[in-house]
Structures are given as C-alpha cells and as structure tokens.
C-alpha cells in the first residue's frame, strides 16, 4: 500500500484550495483582495492552483491608501498581469474627496481605518458578494474568533455575537442582497507557514521584504521609514539602517525591522529566533488600544 | 511534519485555559510582547506567577457582557507537528460551541479536576466526543498538585472513567495525570508523579497516529466547481474540481456520478494543473472523465467498489444551534458538502440527554443546544454516508431559508 501521508503545508494548501473553490461555487461575484503583501500573495498562488488550467475566475482588488510602498505597487501590477486576472484599484484619496471624509492627523496620520469606506464603496460599485482576504487567526485575538466565511451586514460590520456556527468543512455563504461575505482561506496558517510556503513554492516577493538600506526614524522602539506621509518633529533623528519589512502595510503604520536577511531562508531563520510577535513588531496601528482590531472589524475593516 | 487538530473540553474551573496557556508557554509559542500584555493584567491578581489563563482571554465584547463567543483557535508547533487548538467553553449552555469545535478535531482533551473525579460534565463531554466521532480521547486528570499527586486518586478516577467509556463505546482513550498550574506532565515530566510511566501530554500529542483514521478505501469526491478554460489550446477541457473526502482516485478507475448514477472512467487526475498518478484524501484535486457528461456542482464522483447512500428520506442526530426553536414540520435548506437542497424536518423522534444518554420521546420542539434525533425529507436526492461509518461524508448543516443562518449540525444516519 502506498504511503498516503501529507506534509502540513500540503494539508493547509488543500484546505485553502477547497475554500477558494467554495467561493467560486457559491458566489456570483467574488473578488480577491490583493495588496502586494505576503499573505495576499499567498492567496493569489492558492487561487492560481485551485483553478488550473483555467484562470482565476474573479478579479483582484486593491484598496490603495496612497500611502503604499512603491515597491509593493510595482509588484502588484506586475503579478496581477502575470495571473491574467483583472486588477481593480480604488483609491482612498478619491473616497476622501467624494465623501468629504476627514483626513486623519498626527505624526503617523494613517488612512488605514479610512480603507473601510473605499472597500465598502468598491463592493457596492461592482456588486461583490464575497471578498477573499489574507487574514490569519494567529495574528490577533479578534481574528482568532472570526469565521472562515464571515458574514458582514450592509455596512460591512462584523458582529462577533451573530457569527454562524462553522462545522466540518461546510461553509454557509448564503446572504441577503446588500450583505457580503469576507472569506479567509488562510485562517489556519501562521506566519511561519506562509514563509515556508513561499519558500517551497518559489514565490517572488516585493523587494522590501529583504534587507535594504533605508532612512528611518525611531518611534517607541519602532523603526519608521522616512516618507512624505509622516510628520517630522524637531527631535526626530534620521538614521540609515539595514532593514526589511516583516509585514507590508502602509508606510505610515508599518514598522521595519533591523535585518541583514537577504533570502527567504535568512528570514525564516530570523523569525524562528525572534521573540516578538508579527503585529507587535511591525504594526503601529494595533497599539492604540487593546481592542483596536476588534473595533475596526466592527466598522467594516477586512 | 504533519498537522493535528484537537479540542479542549472543560471549563475555567477545571483549568482549561491554564492548560492551553501552559502548552503555549512551555513550547515557547508566546512572544515577549504578548507576555508583557498578560503580565500587566496579571498584576491585579495573585503575586508573582503570571496567570496563564489570560492567554485565552477573549474579546472586549465578551468581557463586557460576560459571555463567551464560541470557539477560539490557537496555534503552536514543535519540531514534530503543527497543532491547531479549538478552544471551546464546556458548560451545558455551550453545547453547540463544543459540537462546532469537535466537528473538525482529530483528538479531544477532556479535563477532569482530580478533586472532583468523573462528574456530569465529564460524561457530557465524552458523549459529545462519541457523537462527533472524534477518533482519540485524552483524559487529563488535572490539579494533581491539589491531591498530593496521589496515585490512588488517579487510579480510582481512571477506573471510573473506564466504566463509563465502555458504555459509550469509546475505544481509544489515554489517561495522563497533570497539573496545568505547575506544569507537571504537560510538556515537561516533573518528578512529582514517579508512579506514572506514560508520556507527557505533549509527547502524546506529537506521536499519536492521525492517518490511521482516514478512510482510504471508500472514495468520495464532491464536485465543487467545473473548470472550463475555453481557451484555444484547451478548447474541450472540462475538469471537475473538488476535494477527496475519503479514498483514492486514479486514471482508469470506473466511477459513478451520483445522484444520477451515470457511469464513466477517469481519464486523468490532476493536482494544480499537473497530472498525478493518484489523488487521495484529503487532497484537493481535479478529475477529468472519458465521457462527455453533464456534471455540476453538488454531484459526487465515487468509485464503483463502495457506494454511499442516495436518498430523499434520511435520519439524523442533530444539535440545534439557533435561538428560534426547531418545530417538526419546519422547512430548511440542507447542505451536504457542495449540495444544498430544500428539506422538511418531518419528525423529532426523541431528544437525547447529553448528560445521561437518556432518550426523551414525545417532544415537539428542540431548543438551542438540544441534541435530537430527527427524520428529514429532502426535495431531491442527496448523496451521503452514515456519519459513524464515514465521518468525512456524513456531516450536514441546516440553513434557515430566510435568515440564512446555520441552525443545526447534523450527523446523518
């Protein structure tokens, strides 16, 4: 009898592909949220595999805050073109203007929370009934409790008390008009799983994931890249450091880590050694309040 | 390295949160910044030691309202295995949450407080483990430090549990004396139980055979999506995408497409666009057939040697999960894998007392958390297996037709 044994990455991949196909099978107008970050890059790879030799049967959508790393945007356009899927980009800038939204102020004025408005408008514009996202349950405790098929009301709001029980591998994507479902196919992956998968699959990444020299300022032990989007104060000291990004979000709310890692192997070795969590090390926006993510999700966030 | 999914059953009083915290802490799965948050919160409690239970602390919405929002998932890994913990509350009013968490678990850890022994809750957790057919049961007898690590206490609890397990037809049980608080026999063997020669909890979790319980002989492949590139080079390509729930599929296999019963032969099995020798559970794959037949999402491809049930009349043991009660005669949608059909719950035959296994007949309604035996009639045939015989294709959910919520988890019979 042959050895019917699968590696954990194969098991995670099989589960995620099953979820991708459920989305394609259950919804009329799904979309995949693609930012050029490693988690959504993994989603694109899974979607490609799920529908081979066909194309990905849904568009890629990017909600562009205007505060992105140029390297991530270049990567986004190139990879989207390679997949043959349609790329839809909607800008937070436009939403701010059209809706008269108030720009956030402060040293690291982040448009992170404003993304929800643009996302909801985009969902409405294209009539998306499902949005596939790269959130993982190990990231944060609000995410640890969210379903793989997470139903949002017409305001995009997550209500943790009204979640549907999710049993076996049976996903209930039934919704009323106006509601939509956020689907998280890599819910059960942890940070290292993503890195090991990227290594195994030989997936190309934006260059900012690897070591490079960058001008940064130090803010509460975080290294923040010098950019036109942050406010420089008199006591800020600009340093040149060898850094890489452990996560890729906005330039205003993502911190760099000091590193000389120039390959995926180096990165995996560093993550294995580090004693700080992914979000703790890199996300400035999660530290505002202990329930920051929970609050944003209730307001329509990814 | 492979993957084990397990559920922990117990309440805060049994030390469940402390146990999970201990597993994460002693396997170095908790990072410094997360630890600092916990330490800040622990200061208000007892001096010195950090409160490991806080690692499983929930959302603000839960703290404010004193409720628990069902299942939280935790992750850790060792060099041998990756683990996914479904952390579900264990009180009777959370039966639905335990059923949800148990549905995907390969193993259940049942906590017993050494001072209390086998209690009603132990019995309930064991009954749910048996209903959901979780292959492995690990009974951890916790708080051994509170009974002076007494071998007699341990032995008498083991004996009590054995008696009960036998009645419930639980086969694979392991017992481990632990102290989640002190860390005895969880990750490290402490010297406090020299009379215990067995594995620590982690050693056990790392080494139990998971694959043993995957069924590789009865093949079930529900079609999720039909891949039709319709490009110039793949003009006639038609691939059926799905997940091998059980069994294996290879080129040349004679298959039946259910519920229609059409026969065909496998032309090729593909994984990620590449032809493979064979696909097996639980792989996601694409199957191509020799004949040009009309196959849609919801159809099931099975090999000829083993046939599932195809029927419109079925029986099920279900756990009711909605605030609105189930009344005989109500209509719902029944989802089995990728097939969703209208159905009516014709009769509620009896309610099962999950504390005692007693059957209460002559009931007309089932309320939230009730486990009942029902008769269902579907609008068109569904393809399924007896849950106890083939767990992978025996689970179903009921969906409220207008509210669209998932109202029940069904173990089909």
Image (spheres, helix red, strand yellow):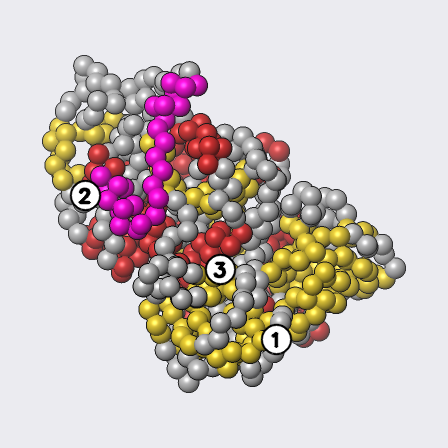
Callout 2: 10 Å neighbours few (<14), some, many (20+)? Answer: some
Work out how far the residue at label 2 is from the one at label 3, CA to CA, in angstroms: 36 Å
How far apart in space, not on screen, are marks 3 and 1 (Cα)? Answer: 19 Å
Q: Disc 3 marks which residue?
A: B225
Q: Which residue is mark 1?
A: B261
> Are tags 1 and 2 found on a single chain?
no
| Marks 3 & 1 on one chain | yes
Image quarter of residue B319 = bottom right
In magenta segment, residue A92: yes
Mark 3: which secondary structure? strand
Q: What subunit carries mark 2?
A: A
Chain of the residue that carries numbered disc 1 in the rendered image = B
* Residue ID for mark 2: A207
The x and y percentages for residue A81 are 27, 46
The quadrant of the picture occupied by the N terminus of chain B is: bottom left
Q: Chain of mark 3?
A: B
Badge 3: how crowded within 10 Å, few (<14), some, or many (20+)?
A: many
Q: From which residue to which does the magenta span run?
A: A74-99
Query: Residue at 48% of width from left, 44% of height from top?
Result: A29
Q: Magenta region, mostly helix, strand or loop?
A: helix
Quadrant of image for the C terminus of chain B? bottom right
Q: Is residue B33 visible?
A: no
Measure the alpha-carbon separation of dots 1 and 2. 53 Å
Image-based side of B178 in relation to A162, left or right: left
* Relative vertical location of residue B208 with respect to residue A135 in this rendering, above or below: below
Q: Is residue A68 visible?
A: yes
Where is A93 relative to B379, above or below? Answer: above
For this rendering, which residue is in front, B187 or A75?
A75
Disc on res. A244: none
């Amino acid at each position: 009898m042959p050895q019917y044994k699968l590696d954990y990455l194969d098991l995670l991949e099989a589960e995620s592909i099953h979820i991708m196909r459920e989305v394609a099978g259950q919804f009329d107008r799904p979309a995949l949220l693609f930012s050029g970050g490693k988690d959504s890059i993994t989603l694109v790879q899974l979607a490609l595999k799920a529908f081979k030799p066909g194309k990905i049967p849904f568009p890629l959508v990017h909600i562009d805050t205007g505060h992105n790393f140029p390297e991530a945007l270049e990567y986004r356009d190139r990879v989207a073109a390679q997949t043959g899927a349609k790329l839809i980009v909607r800008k937070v800038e436009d939403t701010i203007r059209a809706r008269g939204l108030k720009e956030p102020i402060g040293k690291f004025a982040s448009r992170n929370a404003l993304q929800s408005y643009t996302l909801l408008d985009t969902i409405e514009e294209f009539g998306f009934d499902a949005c596939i996202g790269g959130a993982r349950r190990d990231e944060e405790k609000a995410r640890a409790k969210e379903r793989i098929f997470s139903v949002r009301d017409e305001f995009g709001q997550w209500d943790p008390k009204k979640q549907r029980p999710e049993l076996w591998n049976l996903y209930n994507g039934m919704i009323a008009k106006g509601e939509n479902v956020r689907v998280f196919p890599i819910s059960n992956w942890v940070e290292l799983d993503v890195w090991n998968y990227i290594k195994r699959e030989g997936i190309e990444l934006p260059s900012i994931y690897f070591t490079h020299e960058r001008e940064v300022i130090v803010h509460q032990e975080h290294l923040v890249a010098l950019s036109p989007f942050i406010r420089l104060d008199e006591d800020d000291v600009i340093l040149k450091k060898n850094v890489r990004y452990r996560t890729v979000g906005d330039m205003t709310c993502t911190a760099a880590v000091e590193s000389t890692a120039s390959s995926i192997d180096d990165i995996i070795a560093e993550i294995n050694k580090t004693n700080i969590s992914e979000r703790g090390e890199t996300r400035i926006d999660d530290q505002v309040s202990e329930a920051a993510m929970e609050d944003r999700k209730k307001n329509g966030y990814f | 390295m492979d993957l084990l999914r397990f559920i922990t059953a117990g309440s805060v009083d049994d030390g469940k949160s402390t146990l999970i915290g201990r597993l994460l802490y002693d396997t170095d799965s908790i990072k410094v910044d997360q630890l600092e948050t916990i330490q800040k919160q622990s200061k208000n409690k007892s001096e010195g030691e950090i409160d490991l239970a806080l690692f499983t602390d929930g959302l603000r919405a839960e703290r404010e309202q004193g409720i628990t929002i069902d299942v939280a998932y935790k992750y850790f890994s060792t060099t041998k295995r990756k683990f996914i913990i479904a952390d579900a509350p264990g009180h009777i009013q959370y039966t639905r949450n335990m059923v949800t968490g148990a549905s995907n678990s390969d193993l259940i850890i049942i906590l017993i407080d050494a001072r209390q022994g086998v209690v009603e809750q132990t019995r309930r957790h064991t009954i749910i483990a048996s209903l959901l057919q979780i292959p492995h049961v690990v009974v951890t007898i916790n708080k051994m430090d509170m009974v002076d690590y007494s071998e007699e206490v341990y032995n008498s609890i083991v004996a009590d549990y054995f008696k009960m397990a036998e009645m419930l037809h639980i086969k694979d049980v392991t017992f481990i004396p632990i102290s989640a608080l002190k860390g005895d026999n969880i990750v490290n063997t402490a010297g406090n139980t020299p009379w215990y020669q067995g594995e620590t909890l982690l050693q056990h979790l790392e080494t139990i055979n998971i694959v043993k319980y995957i069924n590789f002989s009865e093949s079930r492949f529900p079609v999720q999506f039909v891949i039709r590139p319709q490009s110039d080079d793949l003009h006639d390509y038609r691939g059926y995408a799905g997940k091998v729930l059980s069994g294996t599929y290879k080129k040349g296999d004679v298959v039946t497409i259910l519920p229609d019963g059409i026969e065909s032969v496998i032309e090729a099995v593909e994984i990620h666009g590449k032809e493979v020798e064979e696909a097996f559970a639980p792989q996601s794959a694409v199957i191509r057939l020799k004949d040009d037949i009309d196959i849609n999402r919801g159809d099931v491809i099975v090999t000829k040697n083993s046939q599932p049930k195809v029927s419109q009349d079925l029986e099920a043991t279900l756990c009711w999960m909605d605030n609105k009660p189930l009344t005989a005669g109500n209509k719902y949608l029944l989802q089995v894998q990728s097939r969703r059909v209208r159905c009516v719950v014709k009769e509620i035959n009896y309610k099962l007392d999950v504390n005692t296994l007693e059957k209460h007949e002559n009931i007309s309604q089932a309320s939230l958390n009730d486990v009942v035996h029902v008769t269902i009639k579907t609008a068109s045939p569904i393809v399924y297996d007896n849950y106890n015989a083939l767990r992978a294709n025996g689970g179903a959910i009921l969906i409220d037709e207008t509210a669209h919520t998932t109202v029940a988890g069904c173990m089909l019979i």
